[in-house]
Image (spheres, grey):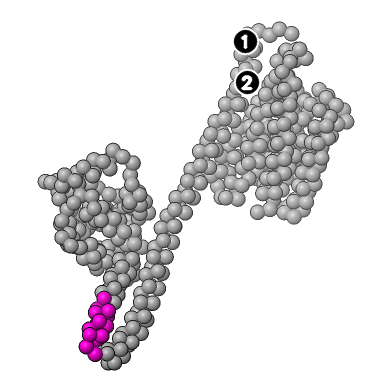
């Protein structure tokens, strides 16, 4: 598990560095791809937090609230033509509101909402130009990520003593394997969002 | 640590709902992508037809030019040789010359079949008339009559020409008919090319076998070419006469 976290750290660090380079090359794309940038940055921060604090319930619930908002808020901002600054303020405000409530069903519906947004976005992009079509794999990766996130959240929420489970270790391995594959694929497809 | 049946069902539903949504989304996404790539493949396939037609034109033109140059050189050589030879040798040479003329005529005919001159001129009526004349071979006669005043867009002539040719050759080959008639008319803003021939037993059997089995390559090419020009084909048997009609839509008519 520790080895996986270091591996994830290296991959995410490379991904964040690539994002910084790409946003410098094409900063106009920043507004159009804000959700991707925010999601990757917070994944990186989540990984650092795990490396520093280990498995922590508070940091977990903070990131559970942040990830869906990374998708929902930039989409709302784009819908109402907000600039990046206002979108980021809205993001911080919605994050604080979510954290104050700390309601597990609120987290669930936020995750479900972002899953629906990702599905609709990927369908919309698939109907668009070939450049847009090339962006869809990353959205599909995010759909899988969110689906796994929701399933894990629900499994944690169920009042069952998982420590007695024999197969939970296998499930964990499968989840980590899928996340790792998704991270590698993100490296492959992230360039399409900034450089055509 | 125990949980009630209701809370278990709720938890299960909360997991199944996003999984179902993701599955549904991916199915719709796959459908859109597959449809999109099918469209691209169809476009590529159609443009390959244009490529084949251009290549056919190029080969015919090259053959025609080469044959013309060789024919002039050979004619001059024959004249020179004929002035030098006498008697039996001259007769042999004349025989060779006659065979060569026949060969040249046949080659010219092949080139004409390959890419008719009228097809290059984009003249609908003369093009189809020439086609019927070319296909009148041996005991088979193909007659042509025209009652149309408007012709469809010139860019559709290519495909229509090869479709008509395929239908007539199919009828000659499979239906065992001696006489075919090609009629052109424009009616209700539709340009209709009808090919009529006798409904012989062979023709009916051939059509029955065609409907039972998967279409052959020729039929598929006919369908593809008709699809490219937005035309449809009608088939009917009236009074022991088979009529295959190519109907080109109103939007393709240029008055």
Tell me: A94 left or right of B132.
right
> Which residue is at the front of the view, A132 or B243?
B243
Residue that lies at the very extreme toward the front in this rendered image: B88
Q: Is residue B6 magenta?
A: no
Mark 1, residue position: B6
Q: Main secondary structure of the magenta part?
A: helix
- Position of the N terminus of chain A, as image quadrant, is top right
- Helix, strand or loop status at disc 1: helix
Q: Could you tell me residue B74's position as x and y percent?
A: 33, 83
> Residue B31 vs residue B87: left or right?
right
Q: Is residue A152 visible?
A: yes
Identified at 85% across, 26% down, the residue is A54
Q: Which residues are magenta?
A: B86-99
Tag 2–tag 1 contact (CB < 8 Å): no
SS type, badge 2: helix
- Residue B14: give its label: 2
Question: Of marks 2 and 1, which one's residue comes earlier in the chain?
Answer: 1
Sort mark 1 into few (<14), some (14-19) or many (20+) by Cα contacts within 10 Å.
Answer: few
Q: Chain of mark 1?
A: B
**How many marks do you count on the picture?**
2
**Quarter of the rendering occupied by the C terminus of chain A:** bottom right
In the image, residue A115 sits, relative to residue A160, either above or below, namely below
| Residue B100 image position (x, y, % from top left) | 29, 77
Neighbour class for label 2 at 10 Å: few (<14), some, many (≥20)? some
Chain ID for label 2?
B
Residue at 68% in and 25% down: A150
As displayed, is residue A161 above or below residue B47? above
Query: Where does residue B16 sit, x and y in percent of width and height?
Result: 60, 22
């Amino acid at each position: 598990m520790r080895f996986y976290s270091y591996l994830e750290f290296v991959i995410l660090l490379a991904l964040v560095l690539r994002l910084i380079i790409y946003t410098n090359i094409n900063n106009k794309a920043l507004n159009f791809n804000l959700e991707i940038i925010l999601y990757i940055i917070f994944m990186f921060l989540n990984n650092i937090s795990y490396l520093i604090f280990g498995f922590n319930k508070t940091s977990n619930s903070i990131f559970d609230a942040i990830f869906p908002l990374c998708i929902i808020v930039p989409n709302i901002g784009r819908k109402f033509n907000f600039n990046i600054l206002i979108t980021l303020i809205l993001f911080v405000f919605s994050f604080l509101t979510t954290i104050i409530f700390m309601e597990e069903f609120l987290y669930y519906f936020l995750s479900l909402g972002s899953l629906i947004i990702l599905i609709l976005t990927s369908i919309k992009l698939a109907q668009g130009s070939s450049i847009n079509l090339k962006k869809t794999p990353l959205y599909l990766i995010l759909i899988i990520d969110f689906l796994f996130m929701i399933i894990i959240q629900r499994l944690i929420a169920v009042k069952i003593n998982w420590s007695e489970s024999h197969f939970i270790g296998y499930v964990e391995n499968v989840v980590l394997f899928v996340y790792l594959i998704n991270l590698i694929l993100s490296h492959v497809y992230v360039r399409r969002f900034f450089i055509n | 640590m125990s949980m009630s049946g209701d809370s278990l069902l709720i938890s299960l539903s909360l997991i199944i709902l996003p999984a179902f949504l993701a599955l549904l989304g991916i199915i719709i996404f796959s459908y859109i992508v597959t449809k999109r790539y099918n469209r691209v493949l169809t476009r590529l396939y159609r443009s390959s037809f244009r490529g084949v037609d251009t290549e056919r034109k190029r080969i015919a033109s090259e053959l025609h030019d080469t044959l013309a140059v060789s024919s002039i050189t050979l004619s001059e050589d024959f004249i020179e040789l004929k002035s030098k030879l006498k008697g039996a040798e001259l007769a042999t040479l004349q025989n060779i010359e006659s065979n060569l003329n026949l060969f040249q005529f046949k080659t010219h005919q092949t080139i004409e079949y390959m890419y008719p001159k009228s097809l290059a001129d984009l003249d609908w009526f003369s093009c189809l008339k020439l086609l019927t004349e070319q296909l009148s071979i041996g005991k088979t006669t193909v007659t042509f009559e025209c009652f149309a005043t408007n012709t469809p867009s010139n860019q559709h002539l290519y495909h229509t020409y090869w479709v008509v040719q395929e239908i007539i050759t199919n009828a000659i080959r499979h239906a065992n008919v001696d006489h075919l008639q090609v009629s052109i008319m424009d009616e209700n803003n539709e340009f209709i090319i009808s090919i009529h021939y006798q409904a012989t037993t062979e023709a009916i059997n051939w059509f029955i076998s065609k409907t039972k089995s998967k279409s052959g390559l020729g039929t598929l090419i006919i369908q593809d070419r008709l699809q490219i020009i937005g035309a449809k084909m009608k088939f009917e048997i009236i009074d022991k006469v088979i009529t295959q009609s190519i109907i080109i839509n109103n939007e393709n008519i240029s008055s």
